[in-house]
Image (tube, grey):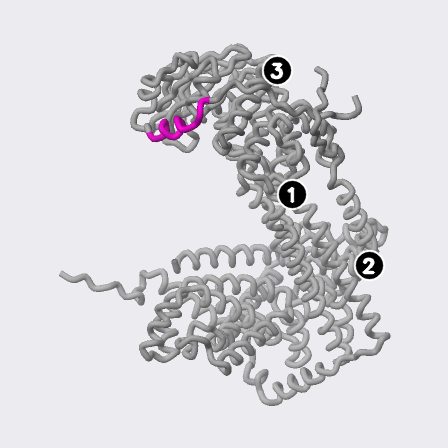
């Protein structure tokens, strides 16, 4: 007797329900948003977009403006660097209680610390920036702290996982000698995982330079603030210079991060 | 620094991951080691040699029986007392416990941590202290030139010798050393075992070491324990371990025995010739 | 014990050779850090200035209790759904853009390379498409959103289009990587036997890589939910725009509710995506 293959379109197949749910979600989304895509993608709209983009092709290169641009770029770069640095320090400090150092470690603070790290992570940098602006006012400081807070959540969790997965050989030998956990961490665990931690931090810097560039849009200083200002005034030439500066800055940081990681792994 | 007396009494132990039905790694073992003794533990793979060292070092809790250090039952102590007792131990695992990017000098100083205050420990991380002691310890293994090198730039044999040199800095009365010679060529192996025995004798330290090199064990150690499948097969002075006893111990594992026979029987070497001048004394 | 100086002494320096190098880099780091701190107007005490402190404490005090009146909760629920809808619509459009771009740029479906090297024109076309994908990916979605808000006005359309373009680039890149690193032989075999490229895609390439492709797409959808909240701050609708409104009015309790809802939403999306990915295994 031959058994017939089960058809995937049966009502009890989980694949079917996933597919059905996905399609339903997509259809509902478009329907409820009332996007009027026909209007958006109409010839008139596209023509406007084309004109807009065309105006971007002639950047403003006056020295006065360029010097302002340079200052804003350095400010954005500084935001990303200081934010990532702060996050590395605090992420490491939080990663220690957030990790189980060895099998059987009670790790009493693990749950709460992980909860804190997840909360820091869940809130996007921009939302942190908007919140901090209330307390710290406009400017790059709020942006730097916003980056630091969000990235602490990200790095803290990555660091904790690295620590938990690291080879225990050196740490165990010190524990047999009765050395306290703090010094075991400094003499054995940290030296073992630090290349990986540094690598994570440098990767995060690449992400943070992009984030720093746009944080200014809500008032966080740097290139973003300039962009929002000039775009609001429809000054397309200045806008295109600023966009070019953003792209160059991103490429710069990506390259620096790549070489730093290469150096670290030698 | 005087040696520790360590004893096991009817100890049974399993690996943490093993099920309750499996054969225990160490089965109802009773053993007593006097201060300053030099003991070699031999046996085929899976005999439980590493587990025995872990039990002696209070690194593994037995499911039955008592482990005593200097007449005190180790697992009856409070955590704080146990930590203090642990400071008198030194354990060298088979794979050298050295973080790859750490420098040799810091790895050696780490062995000294039980004797250092918190402040001094932190100071050592920033700028290594006690460098002269470290140099002397490394010189015993012919490694003093590598003191400032990173561990991952050393060869396997050099790393193993660094792991052994740590013993010379530890403020310990009991040395538990797991397979100290596995990555060493015959010359270096002879030098290493001679150094360990000499230093242990000079400091009065109790030395327990597992060895695959059976001829080294029988020739150099006044007491040899034969372990097989978690049980103590014999406990004899080295010269009383006959080839028949060895064959019986290694039955069905003869290939392990054949390998180590290829090593030339070591002679008693004079102590390391190179003394290093430290300072302008 | 007197140290006996030997004729040939290898005297390693007792000073840490890395010390001066470390001090140098430390100073360099400080020298760079100082202007960076100045540039970012790093003044933590700003939080404690009288005016700011008053505003902050008032704002934070309003967090408890979060706004829970029915009318507001309805608004939040509606906006939360809108955020999900924007993310879903945006990801779907991104998928529509990305699929043809991936098909055009992948070498797995290359017919000209069946007989050795790929011919010049197909190679150039593939490279151009890859650069287009890089371009789409490099501009942050917020910038796209700013542009679209100017062109199509405030509202969700700007957000959907911004996500669609940026994510088309990201999906295209990762799809390409998945296809390139997957098995080519089945596809090559079909192409050699004269099958069309679209046929090969549906019969070999797609089934072979379906799990990875879907997994990444679901992951991207999750990211899109976060992104669409962020885009709301520049007028692209959804939860983000409401949060922006409430923050401008210093309404702490409303902001608190929305933050909680946002975190729950993200958590839910995470769970859903994990479940879906597991169900498709």
Residue in the foreground of this view, choosing between C197 and C157: C197
The CA distance from mark 3 to mark 2 is 60 Å
> Where on the picture, by quarter, is residue C231?
bottom right
Marks 3 & 1 on one chain: no
Q: Check if mark 2 and mark 1 are on a common chain.
A: no
Q: Does the magenta stretch include residue B263?
A: yes
Q: How crowded is mark 2: few (under 14 residues within 10 Å), some or many (20 or more)?
A: many
Task: Between residue B159 and residue B76, name the one nearer to us.
Answer: B159
Residue depicted at 74% across the width and 65% down the height: A216
Going by the image, does C224 lie left or right of C56? left
Which is in the foreground here, disc 3 or disc 1? 3
Span shown in magenta: B255-265
* Residue B51 in sight here: no
Where disc 2 sits, the SS reads helix
**Quadrant position of the C terminus of chain B in the picture:** top right
Q: Looking at the image, how many numbered discs can be counted on the residues?
A: 3
List x then y, in percent, for residue C17. Answer: 74, 39
| Circle nearer the viewer, 2 or 1 | 2
Q: Is mark 1 on a helix, strand or loop?
A: helix
User: Considering only vertical position in the picture, is B101 above or below A242?
Assistant: above
Label number found at residue A57 = none
Percent of width and height locating residue B231: 36, 19
Most foreground residue, A212 or C6: C6
- In whole angstroms, how far apart are the C-alphas of marks 3 and 1? 43 Å
Label 3 secondary element? helix
What mark, if any, has residue A94 been given in the picture?
Answer: 1
Name the residue beneath numbered marker 3.
B203
Give the quadrant of residue B30: top left
Measured Cα–Cα span from mark 2 to mark 1: 27 Å
Q: Dot 1 falls on which chain? A: A
> As displayed, is residue B81 above or below residue A233?
above
Residue C39 badge: 2
């Amino acid at each position: 007797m031959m058994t017939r293959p089960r058809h995937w379109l049966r009502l009890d197949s989980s694949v079917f329900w996933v597919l059905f749910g996905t399609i339903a979600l997509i259809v509902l989304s478009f329907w409820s948003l009332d996007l009027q895509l026909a209007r958006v993608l109409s010839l008139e709209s596209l023509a406007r977009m084309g004109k807009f983009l065309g105006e971007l092709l002639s950047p403003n290169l006056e020295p006065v403006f360029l010097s302002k641009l340079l200052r804003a770029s350095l400010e954005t770069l500084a935001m990303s660097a200081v934010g990532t640095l702060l996050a590395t320090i605090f992420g490491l400090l939080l990663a220690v209680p957030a990790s189980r150092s060895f099998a059987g470690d009670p790790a009493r603070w693990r749950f709460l610390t992980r909860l804190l790290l997840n909360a820091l992570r869940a809130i996007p940098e921009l939302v942190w920036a908007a919140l901090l602006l209330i307390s710290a006012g406009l400017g790059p400081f709020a942006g730097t702290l916003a980056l630091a807070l969000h990235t602490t959540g990200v790095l803290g969790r990555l660091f904790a996982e690295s620590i938990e997965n690291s080879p225990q050989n050196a740490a165990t030998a010190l524990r047999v000698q009765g050395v306290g956990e703090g010094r075991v961490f400094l003499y054995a665990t940290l030296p073992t995982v630090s290349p990986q931690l540094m690598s994570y931090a440098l990767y995060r810097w690449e992400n943070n330079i992009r984030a720093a560039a746009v944080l200014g849009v809500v008032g966080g200083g740097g290139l973003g603030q300039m962009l929002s200002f000039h775009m609001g005034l429809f000054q397309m030439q200045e806008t295109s210079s600023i966009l070019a500066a953003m792209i160059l800055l991103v490429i710069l940081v990506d390259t620096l991060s790549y070489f730093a990681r290469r150096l670290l792994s030698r | 620094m005087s040696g520790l007396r360590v004893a096991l009494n009817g100890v049974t132990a399993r690996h943490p991951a093993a099920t309750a039905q499996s054969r225990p790694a160490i089965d109802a073992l009773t053993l007593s080691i006097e201060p300053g003794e030099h003991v070699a533990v031999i046996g085929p793979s899976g005999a439980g040699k590493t587990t025995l060292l872990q039990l002696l070092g209070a690194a593994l809790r037995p499911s039955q029986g008592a482990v005593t250090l200097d007449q005190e039952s180790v697992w009856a102590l409070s955590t704080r007392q146990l930590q203090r007792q642990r400071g008198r131990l030194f354990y060298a695992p088979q794979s050298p416990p050295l973080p790859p990017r750490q420098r040799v000098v810091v790895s050696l100083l780490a062995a000294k941590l039980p004797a250092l205050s918190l402040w001094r420990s932190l100071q050592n991380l920033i700028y290594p202290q006690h460098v002269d002691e470290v140099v002397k310890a490394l010189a015993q293994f012919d490694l003093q030139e590598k003191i400032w090198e990173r561990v991952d730039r050393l060869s396997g044999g050099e790393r193993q010798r660094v792991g052994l040199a740590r013993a010379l800095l530890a403020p310990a009365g009991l040395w538990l050393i797991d397979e100290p010679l596995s990555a060493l060529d015959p010359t270096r192996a002879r030098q290493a075992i001679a150094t360990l025995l000499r230093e242990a004798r000079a400091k009065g330290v109790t030395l327990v070491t597992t060895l695959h090199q059976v001829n080294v064990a029988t020739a150099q150690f006044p007491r040899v324990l034969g372990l097989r499948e978690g049980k103590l097969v014999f406990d004899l002075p080295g010269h009383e371990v006959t080839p028949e006893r060895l064959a019986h111990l290694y039955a069905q594992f003869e290939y392990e025995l054949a390998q180590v026979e290829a090593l030339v029987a070591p002679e008693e070497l004079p102590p390391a010739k190179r003394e290093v001048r430290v300072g302008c004394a | 014990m007197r140290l006996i100086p030997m004729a040939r002494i290898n005297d390693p320096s007792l000073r840490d050779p890395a010390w001066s190098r470390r001090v140098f880099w430390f100073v360099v780091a400080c020298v760079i850090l100082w202007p960076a701190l100045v540039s970012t107007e790093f003044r933590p005490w700003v939080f404690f200035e009288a005016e700011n402190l008053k505003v902050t404490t008032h704002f934070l005090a309003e967090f408890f209790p979060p706004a829970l009146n029915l009318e507001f909760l309805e608004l939040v629920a509606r906006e939360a759904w809108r955020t999900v809808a924007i993310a879903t619509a945006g990801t779907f459009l991104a998928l529509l853009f990305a699929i043809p771009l991936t098909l055009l740029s992948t070498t797995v479906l290359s017919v000209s390379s069946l007989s050795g090297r790929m011919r010049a024109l197909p190679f150039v076309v593939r490279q151009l498409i890859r650069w287009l994908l890089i371009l789409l990916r490099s501009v942050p979605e917020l910038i796209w959103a700013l542009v679209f808000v100017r062109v199509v006005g405030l509202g969700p359309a700007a957000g959907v289009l911004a996500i669609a373009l940026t994510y088309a680039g990201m999906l295209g890149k990762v799809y390409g990587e998945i296809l390139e690193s997957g098995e080519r032989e089945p596809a090559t075999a079909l192409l050699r036997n004269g099958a069309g490229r679209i046929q090969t895609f549906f019969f070999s390439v797609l089934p072979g890589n379906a799990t990875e492709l879907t997994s990444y797409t679901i992951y991207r959808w999750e990211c899109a939910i976060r992104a669409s909240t962020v885009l709301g701050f520049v007028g692209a609708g959804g939860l983000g725009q409401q949060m922006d409104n409430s923050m401008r009015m210093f309404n702490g309790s409303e902001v608190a509710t929305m933050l909680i809802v946002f975190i729950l939403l993200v958590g839910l999306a995470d769970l859903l995506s994990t479940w879906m990915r597991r169900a498709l295994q």
